[in-house]
Amino acid sequence: MKPDGLVASIGGHDVIIKKITMERMAEDDARQVLPFEAERHVPFDPQSVELDFQILDPEGTGSNMEVLLVAAKRDLVQDKMALLGDAGLDPRIIDVDAFALHNAFRHNHPEAGDGVTALVNVGHEMTNVNILVDGVPILTRDIPFGSRRIREDLQRERGMSAEEAEEAVQGRARLGDLDAFVDRGVEDVAVGIERAAAFLMTQDSGESLGRVFLSGGGARTPGLAEALGRRLGIETRVANPFERVPVRPGAAEPLNLDEAAPMLQLPLGLALRST
C-alpha cells in the first residue's frame, strides 16, 4: 500500500448528511455562509464539526438553491487521520461511507439512477441506509442491526457454537429454519427503511421508495434479500460492485470474489474516487 494518495472514509452517528435550501449564491459565498446555515440543521456544537457541501442545482435560476450538507464531528475525522498516520499512511481524501457506497453503486448500476432507491449496507453490528433521489444521496440513517444479532440468536436459541453460527449466517452450512431468524432481524431493517422513506416523502417530491440494493457482509446471509423484499413489497437485491469493473484473473486470490463481493462495495467506492 502506498503511503500517500490514500482515500479513506468515516461514518456512523457522528456524520450528518442532509439536503437543505439556501438563498442562491456563488459557491465561494456559500462556503462562507455555510457555518451559520449549519447551526439550524446540525445537532452538534458548531465549533466541533467539519463541514462540506455540494450545490445540487448549480445551473438553476430561482432565488433559492438545493444544497447537500455534510457535517462530521472533528474528533471523528482527527481520530481517523491519527490512526492512518500511526500506520505510516497519509490520506489524500477523507470521504463519507455513504458517498463511497453510492460511488460504487452509481458506477455499476447507472440504470437505477431514476426515482427513489435505498442503498442498505448490512454490517456486523449496524446497518446503514442511504436514500437516493434520482441518483443523489439525500438522507442517511443508521439502524442498530447487523449479522451479529442473527449469529447470537442462533447460539442462544439453537445451542450452536460461534463457529457453527458463523457458517450458517455466511451460507456455508445449511440450516433448515434459518429463515425464521432472518425474518426476525429483517423487521428492524424494514422499519428503519420505511421511516427514512416516509420522512423523505414529507420533505421532498413525495415519490415512494422504488427499489433496494444491499451490500456489506450481512448481505450474504441466505434469504436476507428475499425476506426484506417480501417485507417491503419492492424489488430488493444484492448489489454487485464488480458489475462493470473488470477484475484481472487471479488478482483477488485467495478470496472467493463472488462470496466477498458485497463486502467490497465500500472499498471499491473509495478506489473509484478520483477527486
Image: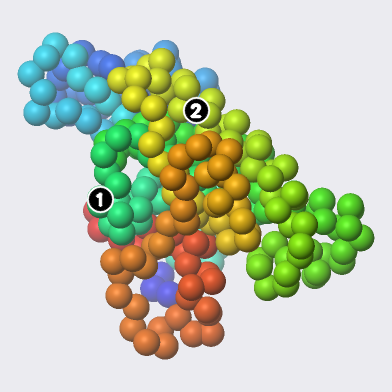
The residue shown at (19%, 14%) is 64
Residue of label 1: 111
Q: Is residue 66 above or below residue 189?
A: above
Q: Nearer the viewer, residue 154 or 274?
A: 154
Q: Which mark is residue 196?
A: 2
Callout 2: helix, strand or loop?
A: helix
Residue shown at 24%/23% (left/top)? Answer: 66
User: Left or right of 102: which side holds 30?
Assistant: left
Foreground disc of the pair 2, 1: 1
Badge 2, how many Cα within 10 Å: few under 14, some, many 20+? many
* Residue 151 image-quadrant placement: bottom right
Residue 92 on image: x %, y %: 34, 57
Q: Can residue 59 be spotted in the picture?
A: yes
Q: Which amino acid does label 2 sit on?
A: Ala
Q: Classify residue 265 by image quadrant.
A: bottom left
Q: Which residue lies furthest to the right in this view?
A: 159
Give the distance between the C-alpha atoms of the residues marked 2 and 1, in whole angstroms. Answer: 23 Å
Give the secondary structure at mark 1.
Answer: helix
Give coordinates of residue 44: x percent, y percent.
52, 23
Q: Which residue is drawn at 30% across and 20% down?
A: 205
87 or 213, which lies in front? 213
Q: Residues within 10 Å of mark 1 (few under 14, many from 20)?
A: few
Q: Is residue 26 left or right of residue 153?
A: left
Query: Residue 209, relative to residue 181: is it above or below?
Result: above
Front one among 179 and 69: 179
Q: Earlier in the sequence, mark 2 or mark 1?
A: 1
Residue 91 on image: x %, y %? 40, 58
Q: How many marks?
A: 2
Does residue 82 sit above or below 185 in this rendering? Answer: below
Q: Which amino acid does label 1 sit on?
A: Glu
Look at 47% across and 34% down and name the residue there: 140
